[in-house]
Amino acid sequence: MKKAILMLAAAVMMTTAFTACSDYEDEPLAPPVTKDPSDGDGGKEPDENIGKPASDRFLYYGDAQIAPFIFQGDNTYTLSLEMDSSWGCLVRTSDTAWSAGTKYGAVAGKNNLEYGKPLALRASSASYDPSNILLPWMEPLMYHSHFWTPAFADIDYGAAASCENSPAFAAICNAAKKWIDMGVDGLRLDGAKHIYHDASSDENPTFWGKFYDELNGYHKSKGREGNFYLVGEVYDDYAAAAPYLKGLPSIFEFAFWYRLEWAFKQSAGCYFANDLKTYRDGYAAIRPDYIISTKLTNHDEDRVKSLLGGSEDKAKLAGAVLLTASGSPYIYYGEELGYVGIKNGKGDEYVRNPMKWGDNTTTTFIKQAESGMNAVKDASVQDGDESSILNVYRKFSQLRNTCPALAHGKMTPHPDFSGKSEYLPVAAWYMEAEGQKMMVVHNFTTKESKLTVNDNVTATAATLGDVTVTTAEGGKTELSMKGYSSWVALLDGGTAVGEWDGEKRADVSYQLLIYSFADSDGDGTGDFNGITAKLDYLDKLGVSALWLSPAHPASSYHGYDVLDYEALNEVYGTEADFRKLIDEAHRHGIKIYMDWVINHTSVAHPWFLDLLSSADSPYCDYYVTSKEPEQDIAAGRIPMIANEGKSGYDAGQWFQTVRNTGNDGARKLKFTLKWGTAPTLTVEETDAIDQQL
């Protein structure tokens, strides 16, 4: 059954306003043979063609079906056929081309055919795209998509204050409980600031608080240890992201990378620890038990090494900083191999390349890649090279898992170096926990930095790059740090750091894209069994949790337009395969986090398709829809956008679809097309079918 990665349901085209799409759009456009109504004869066809199919008058309907009209004389054409169409129809003057002037629809809002009443048609042009012609049993409906794409339909949870009472909330929570029962340890929440339209209001944190309480309560009712883990993607800087900790136990700290990238660009590390302290103090004021999930970049951002000018030394230092600062760090797969990739309008695929294993588990599904990816050495090669970026990540991750101070310690800026311009390139801080105190120093420049450390240094725990450590008079320590180097030391008589014993003391998470990570069966696409086979690799990296990309059936390869929250994409494997992955990961001390996308579903989701079939569908309350969205928003009738009032209306986030009221399948219809300078289309029901198609 495992053929293509994901199926794009035909219903997507049927339920959205893709009026310009067809099976022919990628084929060469033949010059249309069209009689222009503005010609002197009004495009009149010669009488000898009466009773013959027209060569330039067609009805387009259904799933890319097209049928010629029959010329009846006097600029009149008819077509009698049995037809069904979930989106309506169009009149075309070419059966191959979609160029300007070849497509005829109607004016939006005036595009409903009524039995026996002529409907005025409008031609397409370079600046105007007419709307689909709706059949008599259809009613226009608009749906909201916060991500400005007709492929997504936003879910409606009602007012935030009572969202737990909405049917969609119950359905989403029930789906999540299935995976909790299977052993999933947490969820990564996609687009956490886009459940409600106003990202700066209390609505989204309120929603997430109720969602967390529901799932955490269920998690505990099953006898699971600790709290259920939720981490929100609030793609924003510190000030905008921090308030989400009112509802969530953890959020990603995008500000971590923003400040770190700035430090590299300015060769200025002395402010970094102070900035992080400001953020941490702010988080604690909102939620004392917060978990801040640090990261460099992820699947939506350009690759770290590319952003750092392709420098391997900078990429190594970035990894060392991530793994020696406070927080719960996430490593984006391939980061530890020095991956490169810039989207730059080319597409997300450029930052989602296959994991280079150097064996037959390497996937082939995504083929787009920066030329620099050729120079990235396979994991199998880097494994044996002590100086490789892979072994830098391993060293600092294993050190973090060895030392409580690094694993979950409090981070304090070093008073002698932080914020002082004379030490501009240097970032220095303490990490303290369980009676252990450590000092961390990083050099953010190509130049050598020399420091005198007044602390009571017990021993060097780890270095990166060229670092010379000498003891000076009075017990002081002299550091000579070459470009892009790091020094981590034990202070105040702490027990010397030994080899890592394999225990997972730190929260080091790893983000992977299932389709790009490891292929177990040779079909070119990654899968659950492929991940299971690579758990030893992740174990050696010191990983304690895996964030998996969306695992559900979806309408696109990336999975962020879900078709079924309670199923798994069969391309990735079976439920038994997934359960095996969870069980084996747990045996390695690795938790499993699923990507949870509940701002929207695919427009091909069964819930959405059902609401289009009837105004009485039980799923009408599951989505943000309206016949007149601008007026409804202004009047506060759409709770998901009510907080913004009239200013919340954005025409680019509303897309037209149709609801088929009382549609009982194919109907026998007769269409009459009156041509000329003002063409019209009329429809009637009929028992006589002149043309069998």
Image (cartoon, rainbow, N blue to C red):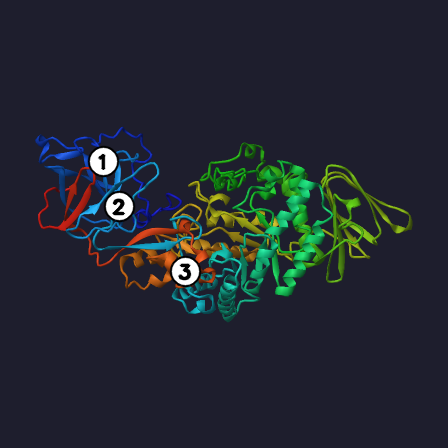
Disc with the residue nearer the chain's start (1 vs 2): 1
Q: Nearer the viewer, residue 482 or 272?
A: 272
Q: Is residue 126 left or right of residue 424?
A: left
Q: Specify the amino acid type for callout 3.
A: Ala
Q: Position of residue 575 (x, y in %)?
A: 42, 56
Please identify the quarter of the rendering in which residue 171 is found: bottom left
- Label 2 crowding class (10 Å Cα cut-off): few <14, some 14-19, many 20+? many
- Disc 2: which residue: 106
Residue 542 in sight in this render? no
Q: Position of residue 173 (x, y in %)?
A: 44, 64
Q: Nearer the viewer, residue 272 or 336?
A: 272
- Above-or-below relation of 205 to 368: below
Q: What's the CA distance linking mark 1 and mark 2?
A: 15 Å
* Callout 2 secondary element: loop
Residue 244 in sight in this render? yes
Please identify the quarter of the rendering in which residue 456 is found: bottom right
Quadrant of the image for the C terminus? top left
Disc 3 vs disc 1: Cβ atoms closer than 8 Å? no
Disc 3 vs disc 2: Cβ atoms closer than 8 Å? no
- Above-or-below relation of 471 to 206: above
Q: Is residue 443 left or right of residue 540?
A: right
- Disc 3: which residue: 634
Q: What's the CA distance linking mark 3 and mark 1?
A: 41 Å
- Above-or-below relation of 8 to 34: below
Q: What's the CA distance linking mark 3 and mark 2?
A: 27 Å
- Disc 1: which residue: 93
- Furthest residue toward bottom: 221
